Image: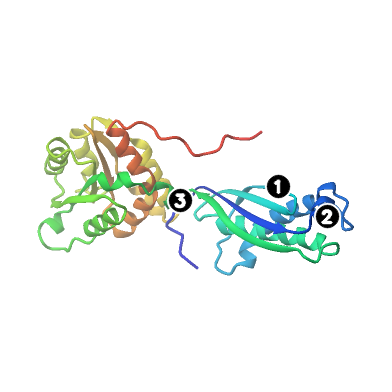
Amino acid sequence: MIDVSLKPDSLRTATARAVLRGTPAAIERLRARTLPKGDAVEMARAAAALAVKQTPQLIPYCHPIRVDWVDTQFELGPDTVTITVTVRAVDRTGVEVEAMTGAAVAALTVYDMLKMIDDTLSIESVRLVEKRGGKSDHASAAVAALTAAVLVASDSVAAGQKEDLTGRLLAERLTAAGYTVVETAVVPDDTGTIAGKVRRWADEQEIDLVVTTGGTGLGPRDRTPEAMDAVFEREAPGLMETVRAHGQRRTPKAMLARGRAGVRGRTLIVNLPGSRGAVADALAALLPGLAHACAMLRGEGHEDDPRPAAKG
């Protein structure tokens, strides 16, 4: 199976469609709900919901998920049955296979209940119509226009006593996400030096995103959060609340991180810990929202919220 342990939960939606073809007489019996085995439409609706929930038992590499909603719609044509299944869940992986499984099993259920009166039946297609949520929702051409810089705060790295691995990881991950990393720098754990470097990036270069790594713990030289007192014009506490909540589900040490996030001018600034594992966890939590935050700082406004309205 693919390892999804680093991924954050998000709203996932998928719609799949199956098409079954038969004789007009058979479809009319389906429409009238006078089949020998009973009401095929309602039976197929129940079968779709059951199949969606059982998909991980049928498809070997499909992750178990917490299904929140299944909706099955039927459209009866002169000689076709179109079955549309929509699945919704808040989880770490998508639900497209679940939706396709539901549509396929619903079509098979109709087939089974019609076959005794129509030997021409065929299931012509089962296909994914749409999926939303996860990485595909956050990929945007706008990210390519965003600049980023990485600041490593570490006495030992600045003195040449230790190799910089975390800053390199940050630059690689941001580049892979579509950002243009214009600079990576290393400074000692000194509040004035840290603050001065971040201010120059924000004020003179107007970099969209500045990510610092290191100096966020409880050690005597961990002073990066204090350096932000001379940098931030506004705090953005939700970012680090998300990072800590995501990290705490993976290690109890996440509670010890004191990183902050905030804004200077049109630059978003985020403080991450100094370990590679903590940085990987933090980026998994942050990347889905960072591009939109940077766009807002550019004055590009709010995008439409893709989430459906609550029912009931």
Residue at the location (34% across, 56% down)? 280
The residue at the point 21 percent across, 31 percent down is: 265
Q: Is residue 176 visible?
A: yes
Of circles 3 and 1, the one toward us is 1
The amino acid marked with disc number 1 is Glu
Relative depth, front residue between 309 and 234: 309
Looking at the rendered image, the quarter that the C terminus falls into is top right
**Precedes in sequence: disc 1 or disc 2:** 2
Q: Residue at x 10, y 61 (%)?
A: 160
Q: Is residue 227 above or below residue 95?
A: above
Name which residue type carries label 3: Gly
- Left or right, 84 with reference to 185: right
Q: Which element type, helix, strand or loop, lies under badge 2?
A: helix
The answer to whether residue 244 is above or below residue 22 is above
Residue topped by disc 3: 134
Give the CA distance from mark 1 to mark 2: 16 Å
- The residue that mark 1 highlights is 75
Q: Secondary structure at mark 1?
A: strand
| Label 2 crowd (10 A; few <14 / some 14-19 / many >=20) | few
Residue 53 in sight from this viewpoint: no
> What residue type is disc 2 on?
Ala
Q: Quadrant of residue 300?
A: top left
Secondary structure at badge 3 equals loop
